[in-house]
Amino acid sequence: MASHAAFASQYVDIASDDAPTRVARMLARDGMVTFDRVYQRQSVVRLALRLLAPWRHRDADADGVTVISDRGFIAARPGYAGFGARGLEPHTDSSSLDLPPRLVMLVCGRSADRGGESYVVDGAAVYHELTSRSPELLKALQQPRAVRFASHWGSVFETVGDGWMRIRLRLDGVEHFTPPVAEAVPVLRAAIERHTREIVLLPGQGYLLDNWRMLHGRRNFRGPRRMYRVLGDPVAGCVLPPGFAPSPGRALLPQQRIPECPAALLSGEIS
């Protein structure tokens, strides 16, 4: 999908009166929200505190923000590829944790001179495709201890709650697929490629992703590209379902309907 179309289709004016409701409902429906007019780091922090409860991440500063830029040689260390200029394979963040953060917020501080386009992949769409095209391979990807992400043994697709699904994935060399599951990886990659949407984030633009559903990555780049990332969980009052639906037609159960987030969470000046 063209980058401008992908951004526009998920856009929410976070300064609008109905922004809290739209953000929560779009995350529940599509797993993603895009926004703009967040130009300074302090504005990133203010917005993040309204959208999520930030995590204390290994690479984050005291304000919860991780600055993603080319830091040279550090990118050669396992698990630090994001701090180089090479592209990143589609992944979910913090895949080695028993329970990864629910939300990923990324804001562009400075565009690359060349390249650096972001891309996202709907893990639900990948799952639904594999259900019909490759059910046996999908079954392998759902097996417990099918893959090791650093120290965590788990599965690519995990059933949670009342039949809901979550995705967990990284393809940067830190992962290890068991031999039967490894045969499914090329098919998985092909499905991911078919559902990849490219997004060119300009300064002040960003996205908020459901990290239990969406994969994200980037292209190679040149120049002083700088992105601000915040990981966290939904703020109190913004309740999301425990994963994505295993079939496209499944509706949210009554007790899992998305309520309005308190309007105060997104009120005020952000830029």
Image (tube, grey):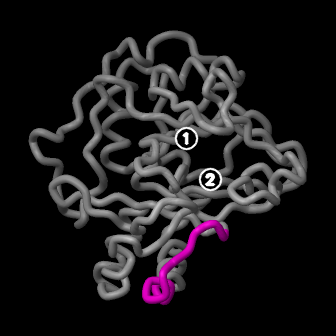
Depth check: 100 or 133 in front?
Answer: 100
Where 65 sits versus 271, above or below?
Answer: below
> Residue shown at 37%/85% (left/top)?
137
The x and y percentages for residue 70 are 84, 47
Helix, strand or loop under label 2: strand
Q: Is residue 128 left or right of residue 175?
A: left
The residue mark sitting in front, 2 or 1, is 1
Q: Quadrant of residue 241?
A: top left
Residue at the left extreme of this rendering = 254
Q: Is residue 254 left or right of residue 216?
A: left
Q: Quadrant of the N terminus?
A: bottom right
> Residue shown at 68%/50% (left/top)?
200
> Residue shown at 79%/37% (left/top)?
110
> Residue shown at 53%/37% (left/top)?
231
Name the residue that disc number 1 marks. 207
Q: Which mark is residue 199?
A: 2
Depth check: 9 or 88 in front?
Answer: 88
Amino acid marked by disc 1: Tyr
Q: Is residue 46 visible?
A: yes
Task: Check residue 174 for magenta coloring.
Answer: yes
Contact flag, marks 2 and 1 (Cβ < 8 Å)? yes
Task: Check residue 134 for magenta coloring.
Answer: no
What span is in magenta?
173-184
Where 256 sits versus 15, above or below?
Answer: below
Q: Earlier in the sequence, mark 2 or mark 1?
A: 2
For label 1, the crowd category at 10 Å Cα-Cα, with few meaning under 14, some 14 to 19 and many 20 or more, is many
Depth check: 180 or 255 in front?
Answer: 180
